[in-house]
Amino acid sequence: MFQVCVRAHFDAAHFIRNYEGDCANLHGHRWDVEVCIEGQQLNDLGMLIDFKDVKQSIRKALKLLDHSLLNDLPTFSSKGLNPTAENLARFLFLEFKRDLMLGEKRLAWVKVFESPDTWAIFKEDQ
């Protein structure tokens, strides 16, 4: 099994509704995001997927989030979801899954770092 992973980042603010602590206040992060694709077969060039295609998909999705107040985005505001690292990981997973042409490959997971030492991962049940 091969895995190809790409990392990128965006800057955005958020707050956690109904949280008792500092994170209830408006604050910002430089969010790092890792996207990992996996599969068994390499193409004729010896690639699982072109890094360029993964980077393009990441840029497209992160443009929706960059320099925003995440709580105001329809994904979070209309559903009453807190923009936690966990919910961001699921949101981005679904965005990448919709955007990437994976064929026999699959989106293995999306990891969202809220800081260098804290992160959440979303992956589908297998």
Image (tube, rainbow, N blue to C red):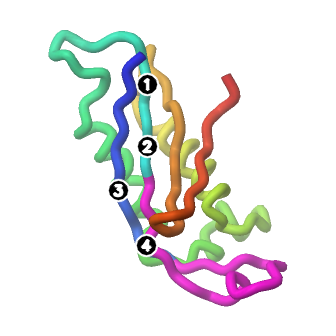
Which residue bears the numbered disc 2? 35
Give the CA distance from mark 4 to mark 3: 10 Å
In magenta segment, residue 40: no
Q: Quadrant of residue 16?
A: bottom right
Furthest residue in direction front, as rendered: 117
C-alpha gap between disc 2 and disc 3: 9 Å
**What amino acid is labelled 1 in the image?**
Glu
Mark 1 and mark 2 in contact? Answer it, CB < 8 Å. no
Q: Name the residue under label 1.
A: 38
Q: Residue furthest left?
A: 45
Crowding at dot 3, Cα within 10 Å, few <14 / some 14-19 / many 20+, comes out as some
Q: What element carries label 1?
A: strand
Looking at the picture, which amino acid does disc 2 mark?
Answer: Val
Could you tell which of marks 2 and 4 lies nearer the N-terminus?
Answer: 4
Q: Which of 6 and 119 is in front in this view?
A: 119
Residue type at mark 3: give it.
Ala
Q: Is mark 3 on a helix, strand or loop?
A: strand
Q: Give the range drawn in magenta.
A: 13-33
Q: Residues within 10 Å of mark 2 (few under 14, many from 20)?
A: many
| Position of 52 relative to 59 (above/below) | above
Above or below residue 125? Residue 23 is: below
